Amino acid sequence: MSSDSEPTTISPPAASTGVAGERSVAERRHLLRFLLRLGHLLLATGAPAGLVETSLRRMARVYQIEHFNALVLPTVVFVNFAEEDSLQIEFTAEQGLVLRFDQIEAAYELARDAEREPIDPAEGLKRIYAILAMQPRLGLLWGVLGHVLVTVGIALVLRPAADVVGAAAFFGLVVGVLKVLARNRGIITTLLPTVAAFVVALVALLAAQHGFAASPIYVLVASLVTFLPGGTLAIATVELAYGDIVSGGTRFVSGLLQLVFLVLGMLAAASIVGLPPDKLLTPGPEGAVRAWAPWLGVLLFGVGHVLHYSARLRTLPWMLALLCVAQAGQLVGNAAFGGYMSGFFAAMLITPASYMVQYRLGGPPSMVTFTPALWLLVPGSLGLIGMAELVGNDRLAGVENFVATLFSIVAIGLGSVIGTGVYNALFEPVFQRAGTMANVMLRYLRLRR
């Protein structure tokens, strides 16, 4: 994760060895706790488990820890190291830690510093606690406005029609307020996806019952986009492709359960109102599609993420650039190959682009720019539509849509794996040679002086 290193493949390297320093038992315990807490912090950014293990091993080399081992799972981090006189083992487990984008950037900065030179564990722990205690930079109202913009943006990308965009803005406001009310409330936060889906579907079905046109499924998908597990499922596919079976399988099941929770909320609303679930699938009227509308949606989608997730303002240009790459890649892939290949082609472009922004251009961490780009591909929305159809009347279409979702997720994950390989094989050597040539030139100029 350091700025002078390439994004290593997710498969962890062999354990590093070094000259063990003279440390007391208390110092070793303190260092282990720092590495544990930092590992959990990095895991909460959404990074693949293998990359977290690789980062911890780099830190171990900096601290000259002998026989260091790390095992990272979606909810558990295990680290140990053996020095000449004792064996130190420690592990911890946490769940439910979700970081905003500004916290993610601070976490990666701490990891980068720890990979470059040793940080006093006490100071490192203070920085971790400070990151966890960070308050949103722009306040709750700006966060709600950001969620509205995210919803409107994805609605413009999915179906740019005035009635759809208006309904999406309203539902985005409702869900944004619900997220504020449920913040840091334990089990309520866990149940928030189901509650939000229930409220949104209830309002939509009540509107249909009283003679108003039922909101199309695209509006519901847009309002629930921040709950859709498309990014989680894509990262899970990447981990499975690299052989991280436990971590990848756990994430994959977790993502599917998230879809089930959303559908359960919709079904509960349908049972109360007394209308069949397929009312949620009522398509909206087809209208003229403006060519600029999806690109306006991309702009609003990016600005909304910066506001909703309290990202630093310097992140906005990088995020918009990655979102444009994702949208352009999806359009080109769909025109050239069609079907599932559009997501594959887009993921193959945004993966090396996000690495280049982080490692070579001094931009934000790849998880800050890569994750919204994955959300823009909306693989989870197909799954939500398919599962709604499964419980409605069109079960054959539901099965087809759900299978399409699985293929889309696999294609996006495979595109990300190939994109990482392309960066490591093509871009990184060029940057390294350019850096070497620059150093040679600097030395030559100094000698001339």
Image (spheres, rainbow, N blue to C red):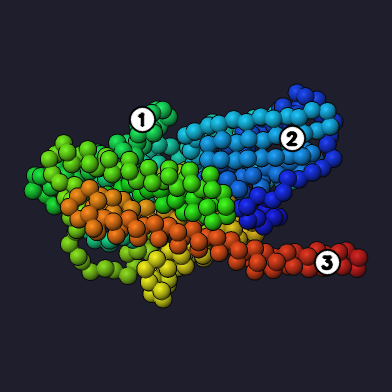
Q: Which residue is mark 3?
A: 440
Disc 3 secondary structure class: helix
Which quadrant of the view contains residue 76? top right
In front: 410, or 105?
Answer: 410
Residue 282 drawn at (x, y percent)? 17, 55
Q: Residue at x 43, y 44 (%)?
A: 253
Residue 164 drawn at (x, y percent)? 23, 56
Residue found farthest to the top: 26
What distance separates the C-alpha of mark 1 from that of mark 3? 59 Å
Closer mark to the observer between disc 1 and disc 3: 1
Closer mark to the observer between disc 2 and disc 3: 2
Residue type, mark 1 in image: Ile
In the image, residue 433 above or below residue 129: below
Residue type, mark 3 in image: Val
Q: Which residue is mark 1?
A: 188
Whether residues under marks 1 and 3 lie with C-beta atoms below 8 angstroms apart, the answer is no
Closer mark to the observer between disc 1 and disc 2: 2
In the image, residue 152 above or below residue 328: above
In the image, residue 89 above or below residue 335: above
* Sequence order check, earlier mark of 2 and 3: 2
Residue 248 drawn at (x, y percent)? 51, 48
Q: Residue at x 70, y 66 (%)?
A: 429
Q: Which residue is mark 2?
A: 81
Is residue 274 left or right of 349 when viewed as pictured? left
